[in-house]
Image: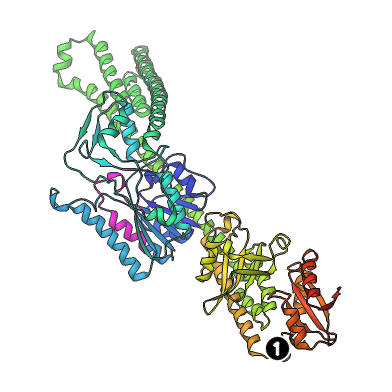
Amino acid sequence: MNVLLTGNTDLLSRKFTERLSQDYKCILSKEHMAPGIGGKNISTYPAGGEEEEVAVYAAFRPEAVVFFSHALDGAVKVFDELEDLESNLYQARRSSVKHFIYVATNDYEYYDVSVMDGTPSRQVLLKACEELCKTFTEKYEMRITILHVPFIYGTERSGCRVWYLIDKAVSGESLSFRGAAEDVTDYLNDEDLAELLSRILDDPMEDLFSEMHLDGQNHHAFKEVFELLVRGKDNKVRFHDSVTAIPVANGDETARKEYGWFPTHQLVKDLPAMLDAAAQESLRKGRSYTRRKNRRQLRERIRVVLEVIIVCLLAEFCNRLTANNIFLDFFDFRLIAILLMGTINGLVPGVVTAILACIGFLVENAVITQWQILFFNIQNWIPFATFFILGTITGYTKDKHDDDVIYVKEEHDILEEKYTFLTGLYDEVLSGKEEFNSQIIGYRDSFGKIYSVVTRLDSVLPDKVFYESINVLEEILENNTVAVYTVQGGRPFARLMVASNAISEHLTKSLDLDKYPEMHKALRDNQTFVNREVKEGYPSYAAPIHRNNELLGIIMIEEATLKQQNMEFLNKLNIISNLISDSFVRATEAQERNDETEGDTLVLKEEYFAPILETRREMRNKNLLDFVLLRIVQDKKSLTELSNAVSSCVRSNDILGRGRDGEVYLLLSQLDEAAFGKVSERLSKSGVSYEKVTE
């Protein structure tokens, strides 16, 4: 199942996605995720506007969406919350998303708005978000679950507020809490949240709209949290008298009752390790970054200074060398020095070179001209102005060019990311197209396949229905641990009729349903049993065969792989089991309407017994079942006496019938040689003579 994680995903740590990706393929924005997130079942996409959002829904086709509110972690300004939520709900509806989960804060609902200062616009906005979810459920019948959560934190680094406070505490900065020192709040670990989300996605509640208030079991006053963070240091702290956007410790029992979920992480035990990790990270990053930065800046400054000095000295040397040259008398090498430094190194080196050129010009002309004339004669200002203008223009041009290059590079990186994203979307769409073409051609999950299943199950012979049901279940579900049991007379015992070859030797022939109370209750209520708690001895799945509120049979999946323990597999099982149930009920009723037995006996007529025997032989040849065939010696007994005597010794699923040779035969279902001795003993005591037929 593809699960899109959207909204305020910055506060999710690597362990959150690691836990959720064990069961589902997670899709989230690469710009809004914590460092280190990645893996086989995690896909990313670049953040963007509405077009990118539409492309994500179209390419990945998520079956579920988890939207994290921007108001989580006590955010005050959430102006885009309603618009963002509405956009995702709209795209989810268009993409036929099966389940939409809105992870919201629990701070706005439990405060008295009348005592708050100003207009409670934030509370009104978040209330509107919840009403929007209810509207989509009522109008479009979307399955929506709202989870009200307290502060979220992870043991690994993320963008949550707890890590923000940890960094402040480690660096010795002042801490600020939007509440009084005695105000109690709650904290929920994101791994516990991921565990609950996995269970909700696997087994949604029956109601289309549901709501839960989660309790992180970490109720602490702000003063306690401050003391845990600083660990005796002298960090300053500021508490506020008025509570603003702070989650409260107020959970309910819905998650515990419906999913057996409860948080396992404790903030008191997690914080010391988180603080130590932040301190080591800060120390390592600070030293490494400062050292590299200082070295780089020092090398750059030394290079520029040396270049300016060398170029200026060369310019002065060239001027002295060409002073008496009539062809170069009009040329000043200081202009070349300023041009080079401004063009190569930018504005500041260009201006510095211009200053040095002015000093050189003054020194050179001070020998032949008084300094008063140099400064007070306006005509002598032209060289100085030329030096500064040239240095400024070339330096500014160089700096502007560097800024343009950086801007173009950033724009190129963005376009490259979009191109990579679109290429990935194209590959996803192409892969999906090939997969759908394969499904249509092979009609494994198409209407053609359903028609084929209905045709194969269309029989008036119950044994034929059972025979085909095993083949159909193994083919559609891709599982070879299928078994079909029959239940008669409303008794709590099930008899094995047919089973997959891989498990036929290990299955019990008779099943006492009272030993499986949870499964028996679900089957009586005409519901498919799913062994979510992995109870020992229970099958993975058990689907009922019902007629008029009476349990007639059971379709069991003994063992399901990890990939088959999801809603898709369950839906397929329900569809196929309903088809099998309808076919079996139809065949049973057809038999009841016909006059199949001879007189008042239980002996089937030859035209009805022969197809049953032939079907049983086919199933035995494929190791789907086993049986023993006996030819009954009638002696001088009437057919009625013989029928009564035999029926008192055998089970309800054993069949007595007339063969093509006119003799009476007894078909003992699911009986091997080891169990035949008990039946033989009962027949002998009842005075029934027989001959075992070997085939």
Q: Nearer the viewer, residue 316 or 323?
A: 316
Quarter location, residue 569: bottom right
Query: Which residue is at the front of the view, 411 or 656?
Result: 656
| Residue 370 spot, x, y in % from top left | 17, 9
Where disc 1 sits, the SS reads: loop
Q: Examine the structure image and report whether residue 88 is included in the region drawn in magenta.
A: yes
Q: Which span of residues is magenta-colored?
A: 68-89
Query: Does residue 682 appear anywhere in the picture?
Result: yes
Q: Taking 566 as reference, is 379 above or below it?
A: above
The answer to whether 56 is drawn above or below residue 160 in the figure is: below
* Residue type at the position of mark 1: Glu
Instruction: Indicate whether residue 569 is drawn in magenta.
Output: no
Residue 178 placed where, x, y %? 22, 40
Identified at 63% across, 82% down, the residue is 588
Residue 310 drawn at (x, y percent) = 38, 16
Q: Residue 231: which quarter of the image?
A: top left
Query: Which x, y percent locates residue 564?
Result: 58, 59
Q: For mark 1, what is the residue?
A: 596
652 vs 38, left or right, is right
Asked which quadrant contains residue 164, the reply is top left
Q: Dot 1: few (<14), some (14–19), or many (≥20) neighbours within 10 Å?
A: some
Q: Is residue 658 left or right of residue 562?
A: right
- Return the residue found at the far top: 367
Q: Is residue 127 above or below residue 573?
A: above
Question: Which is nearer the eye, 179 or 558?
Answer: 558
